[in-house]
Image (cartoon, rainbow, N blue to C red):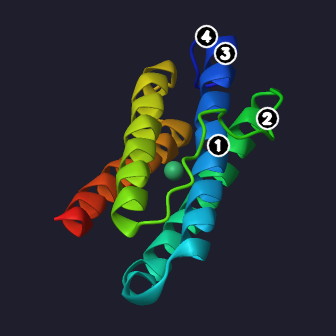
Amino acid sequence: MKPVKHEKQAIKSLNEALAWEIRAALMYAHYAAYLKGRDRLDFEEHFSKEGEEGMHHAKIVRQIIADLGGKATTTPDPTPIPDVREADKMLAEALKTEEQAEKVYRELLPLFDHPTSWHHDLRHIMMDEEKAQIELKRLMK
Ligand SMILES: [Fe+2]
């Protein structure tokens, strides 16, 4: 038996999470490219690291969807990525994205039996989203 309740709903929710991860990776890569001057020194590494984390999360979520026999999305969440050029606006947009990602994971976690490795992995991703918000708020002070 698979450690998941409401398998169809779980695949749908996982795909929502995957779409947000793909969007987050795109957003961070885009913003990293447009950082200028001191902002570049301050944030380029952080944005690149967060983008890589998004791809890492996407890999885990995609694999769970595949293991469940579902079709993983290859499309980012359609929420537009505002083309801002100032670092403080990029940080504010990043915070919104991390908050949304955490919300999606928080909603999908109850669909997975606990304690199981899928639940564990998804919970860890959710905590990464939470930690990203804490760090962004520190950077925005
Ligand atoms: Fe993520």
Mark 3–mark 4 distance (CA, rounded to whole Å): 4 Å
SS state under label 2: loop
Q: Are marks 1 and 2 in contact (CB under 8 Å)?
A: yes
Q: Amino acid at mark 2?
A: Ala
SS state under label 4: loop
Mark 1–mark 3 distance (CA, rounded to whole Å): 14 Å
Mark sitting earlier along the chain (2/4): 4
Q: Is residue 1 in view from this perspective?
A: no
The quadrant in which residue 55 appears is bottom right
**Left or right: residue 127 compared with residue 49:** left
Residue annotated with mark 1: 61
Residue 99: give its label.
none
- Given this view, does label 1 or label 3 mark the residue nearer the observer? 1
Residue annotated with mark 3: 7
SS state under label 3: helix
Pointer 1 residue Cβ closer than 8 Å to ligand 1 = no
Relative vertical location of residue 20 with respect to residue 38 in this rendering, above or below = above
Mark sitting earlier along the chain (1/3): 3
Mark sitting earlier along the chain (2/3): 3
Q: Which quadrant holds the N terminus? A: top right
- Given this view, does label 2 or label 3 mark the residue nearer the observer? 2
Q: Is residue 89 in view from this perspective?
A: yes
Residue 94 percent location from the top left of the image = 43, 53
**Residue visible at 70% across and 13% down in the picture:** 8
Residue annotated with mark 2: 72
Q: Amino acid at mark 1?
A: Val
Mark 2–mark 4 distance (CA, rounded to whole Å): 17 Å
Mark 4–mark 1 distance (CA, rounded to whole Å): 17 Å
